[in-house]
Image: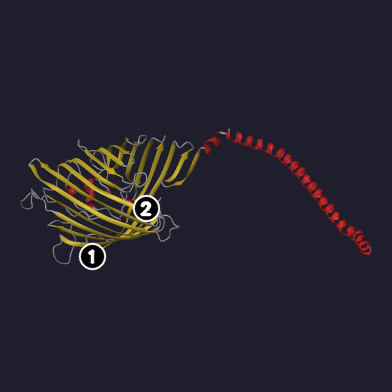
């Protein structure tokens, strides 16, 4: 009994000590929750008030801004200014209107260099300008294109290179009229800054450079391109005879023209008639020149004419592509073969034909040492060419019916560096092996036959283009 009395006494003493704190804890937690709920409610009300104030300020500001824009656009000069943009793209500096129906591009290049020739050459050491060109391209209503290109490096004034208008609305059938490149060879259709080496191969002159006429051109399936032209055959001057020149080419682009326009197979054809009444009817049309322009064949009195039909064919191809996805390493391989025959019809009768054969093969490799600079890189190159002009069917001694033959091998070693896609430096070492008989124009030499020797020339050239 005594034990039970002690138990109840302890229970009544300890129970209030345990229950009371628990009740206090529960009461304290509920109070804190209520305070938090009240604080959240106050913050929500405050946020709603701020949103209302922002809305009241935003609406007048938006209406005010729209009103200012409407007033500005109603001014005639403002609408006109907003429709014209200008800047620079891959084609050059441009000005265009908003709908793209009128676009004007300006591009150009400057090439200046130094030529050094060995002492027994007829040529003199000299600084030179290989090209100072400015071109304007106008695109009108997206279907018409006009181009004017000038070249300035000559003392006789400004030379007009390109001047033509063409309809480009149908990819398969464009029409061009004016003065432009003759669609016959590959290398002869390059401007000076586009070639693999500083100079073009000499036999390219047989296919003309630019001429005046009419041309139909187009591309099928982005892979086959054709060009057919009827031209004066006089170069960059009006026609001096009733005769015309017919020229054309076909190119196949295995990687599609829009994606790789510099890789193709090429076939060109030309047919024209030379006449002694004009200035281009002499043997110059079938002569050989050094790559830098000195004539090697001077003709023989009474035989320096190729009056009659000229017929030629040109086959070749080009491969130009990057070797890695990062576009650091690039290779360019190019070559072509040309055969031309010239008639020699005179009042005294027909003389043996003059045949011309020429080919070249070149390779250029470019490696970008600074990939962060677009278009930069070092580029070694090598090119070899062969050209010969003769009338092998004469069978007689050199004279009225037999022209002395001429043959030339040319070897070009090059090393260049592009600082970026606009500025580059190029060095070429050119060796010309000349073989001809009794014809002025060969190299000077200390001993031996001056008509059979090898010349060396060195060229350093800077190019800036935009």
The foreground one among 465 and 303 is 465
Mark number for residue 52? none
Residue at 61%, 36% (x, y): give it. Answer: 69
Query: How far is the residue under mark 2 from the one under mark 1?
Result: 29 Å
Question: Which quadrant would residue 213 be assigned to in this image?
Answer: top left
Question: Which secondary structure, mark 2?
Answer: strand
Q: Earlier in the sequence, mark 2 or mark 1?
A: 2
Name of the residue lying farthest toward the front: 1
In the image, which is nearer the foreground, mark 2 or mark 1?
A: 2
Q: Which residue is mark 1?
A: 119
Residue 58 in the image, given as x and y percentages of width and height? 69, 39
Residue at 13%, 63% (x, y): give it. Answer: 449
| Colour pattern of the rendering | secondary structure
Q: Is residue 140 depicted above or below 15 in this figure?
A: above
**Residue 252 seen from this side:** yes
Question: Which secondary structure, mark 1?
Answer: loop
The foreground one among 154 and 314 is 314
Residue 93 in the image, given as x and y percentages of width and height? 44, 46
Label 1 environment density (alpha carbons within 10 Å; few <14, some 14–19, many ≥20): some
The foreground one among 89 and 241 is 89
Q: Which residue is mark 2?
A: 110
Q: Is residue 223 depicted above or below 422 in this figure?
A: above
Left/right placement of residue 61 relative to residue 411 reads right
Residue 111 in the image, given as x and y percentages of width and height? 35, 54
**Residue 182 seen from this side:** no
């Amino acid at each position: 009994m005594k034990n039970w009395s002690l138990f109840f006494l302890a229970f009544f003493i300890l129970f209030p000590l345990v229950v009371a704190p628990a009740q206090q804890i529960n009461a304290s937690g509920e109070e804190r929750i209520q305070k938090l709920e009240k604080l959240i409610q106050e913050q929500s009300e405050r946020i709603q008030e701020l949103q209302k104030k922002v809305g009241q300020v935003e609406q007048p500001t938006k209406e005010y801004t729209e009103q200012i824009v409407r007033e500005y656009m109603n001014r005639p000069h403002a609408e006109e200014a907003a429709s014209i943009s200008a800047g620079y793209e891959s084609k050059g500096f441009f000005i265009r209107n908003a709908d793209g129906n009128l676009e004007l591009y300006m591009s150009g290049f400057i090439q200046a260099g130094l030529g050094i020739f060995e002492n027994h050459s007829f040529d003199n050491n000299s600084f030179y300008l290989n090209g100072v060109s400015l071109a304007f391209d106008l695109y009108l209503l997206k279907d018409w294109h006009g181009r004017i290109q000038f070249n300035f490096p000559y003392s006789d004034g400004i030379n007009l290179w390109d001047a033509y208008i063409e309809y480009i609305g149908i990819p398969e059938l464009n029409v061009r009229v004016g003065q432009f490149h003759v669609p016959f060879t590959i290398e002869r259709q390059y401007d000076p800054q586009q070639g693999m080496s500083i100079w073009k191969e000499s036999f390219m002159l047989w296919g003309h450079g630019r001429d005046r006429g009419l041309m139909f051109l187009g591309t099928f399936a982005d892979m086959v391109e054709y060009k057919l032209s009827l031209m004066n055959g006089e170069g960059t001057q009006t026609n001096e005879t009733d005769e015309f020149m017919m020229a054309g080419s076909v190119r196949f682009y295995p990687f599609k023209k829009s994606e790789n326009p510099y890789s193709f197979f090429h076939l060109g054809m030309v047919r024209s008639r030379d006449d002694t009444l004009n200035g281009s009817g002499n043997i110059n049309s079938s002569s050989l020149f050094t790559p830098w322009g000195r004539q090697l064949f001077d003709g023989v009195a009474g035989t320096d004419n190729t009056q009659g039909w000229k017929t030629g064919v040109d086959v070749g191809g080009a491969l130009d592509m990057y070797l890695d996805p990062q576009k650091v390493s690039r290779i360019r391989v190019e070559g072509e073969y040309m055969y031309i025959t010239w008639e020699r019809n005179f009042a005294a009768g027909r003389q043996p034909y003059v045949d011309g054969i020429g080919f070249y093969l070149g390779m250029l490799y470019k490696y970008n040492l600074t990939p962060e600079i677009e278009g930069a890189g070092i580029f070694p190159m090598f090119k070899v060419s062969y050209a010969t002009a003769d009338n092998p069917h004469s069978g007689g001694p050199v004279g009225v019916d037999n022209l002395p033959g001429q043959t030339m091998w040319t070897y070009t070693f090059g090393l260049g560096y592009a600082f970026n896609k606009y500025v580059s430096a190029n060095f070429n070492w050119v060796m010309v092996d000349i073989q001809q008989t009794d014809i002025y124009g060969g190299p000077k030499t200390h001993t031996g036959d001056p008509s059979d020797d090898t010349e060396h020339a060195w060229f350093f050239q800077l190019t800036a283009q935009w």
